[in-house]
Amino acid sequence: MTAPTIRTDALYARVRTVVPRVEWATMEDDVAAIWRLKHERNAVILAHNYQTPEIFHGVADIVGDSLALAREAQHVEADVIVLAGVHFMAETAKLLNPAKTVLIPDLRAGCSLAESITAADVRTLRAAHPGVPVVTYVNTSAAVKAESDICCTSGNAVKVIESLGVDRVIMIPDEYLAQNIARQTGVEVITWAGHCEVHERFTPRDIAQIREDYPGVTVLAHPECPPEVVDAADMAGSTAQMQDFVRDEQPTRVALITECSMSDNVSAANPAVEFVRPCNLCPHMKRNTLSTIRAALELGRHEVRIDPELAARARAAVERMLAV
Ligand code: 13P
Ligand code: SF4
């Protein structure tokens, strides 16, 4: 099989409004190598919406929010999946497509939510609230998922909770997401004090300041933000729901109250929209770079492995979510 000729110019056209040409010049070698390696290794790159534009628009095959990446991972036919995101996303891909080699370019790509809770914590919560179903955000380890009844993402949490038909759930580990969803569904939620280190930093004052400085701005917030921030926004939704809103509504000015790279990626695809760029960076997402992705493909590292018995229990919780 001959490797395809890589036209990095065509790729640059996708990011030229957010990546200066001089910067792209330092990236071209890695971009071309990654496309060649994907072909040689029969690999695909799944990238979360928080990846930098040269990854998101330049080398990824499939992009999306946590829900889309989980759904798409199930159907990957290539031998290798490189997950340009964080560790729980790579684990979810492995759970849903266990025959594939799943690589995470940097093992340190964690998540403050995933780190906030252990499997033993879930068992303690269950014992304290017998019979109450455990709804677990996908931003958790496979071990925590394995102790859960069903998973959810920010994109489907309302539907998942409503599908249970109960008036009380344990919803872990994101306290703010749980509070936001409780208000939308009217279901009582028992929460855990986990927070996203990116979204917990936004305040209603930030939003008031943005509105004062940028008249007419439309403010979209992620539901991992505190409820008072969601209240101050015009709309709350997952990263894909924010992206769809901008694509469909084409607001004159928009502020995305979420991780930095989202604005770059959505702006590159919507050049007519003016983006106000409040910037809270996720250090875990930023562990992925063109060079770590290239090394992952060259060296076959770092492979995600999950104990089969634990994987079966965790997979059941994720599959129940996907069936909703
Ligand atoms: P979504 O892309 O599912 O909205 O999740 C945001 C996030 O913080 C993922 O780590
Ligand atoms: Fe975790 Fe927040 Fe980073 Fe997403 S943005 S990976 S929820 S710390």
Image (cartoon, grey):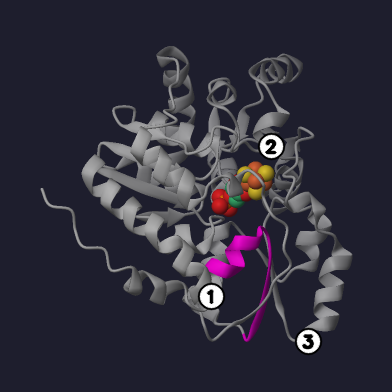
| First of labels 3, 2 by sequence position | 2
Q: Is residue 41 left or right of residue 215?
A: left
Q: Residue at x 49, y 75 (%)?
A: 21
Residue 324 at least partly seen:
no
- Circle 3 packing at 10 Å, graded few (<14), some (14-19), many (20+), is few
Residue sticking out furthest to the right: 205
236 or 159: nearer the viewer: 236
Figure check: 1 above or below 193: below
Report the span colored magenta.
252-265
Q: Was residue 254 drawn as part of the magenta stretch in this picture?
A: yes
Q: Mark 2: is the Cβ under 8 angstroms from ligand 2?
A: yes
- Circle 2 packing at 10 Å, graded few (<14), some (14-19), many (20+), is many
Q: Which residue is mark 1?
A: 20
| First of labels 1, 2 by sequence position | 1
| Quarter of the image where one finds residue 140 | top right
Dot 2: what SS?
A: loop
Q: Which residue is mark 3?
A: 215
| First of labels 1, 3 by sequence position | 1
Q: Which residue is mark 2?
A: 113
Amino acid found under the numbered disc labelled 2? Leu
- Circle 1 packing at 10 Å, graded few (<14), some (14-19), many (20+), is few
152 or 21: nearer the viewer: 21
Give the number of the mark in front: 1 or 3: 1
Q: Was residue 302 drawn as part of the magenta stretch in this picture?
A: no
Q: Residue at x 45, y 61 (%)?
A: 27
Q: Residue at x 73, y 51 (%)?
A: 198
Residue 24 position in % (x across, y down): 47, 68
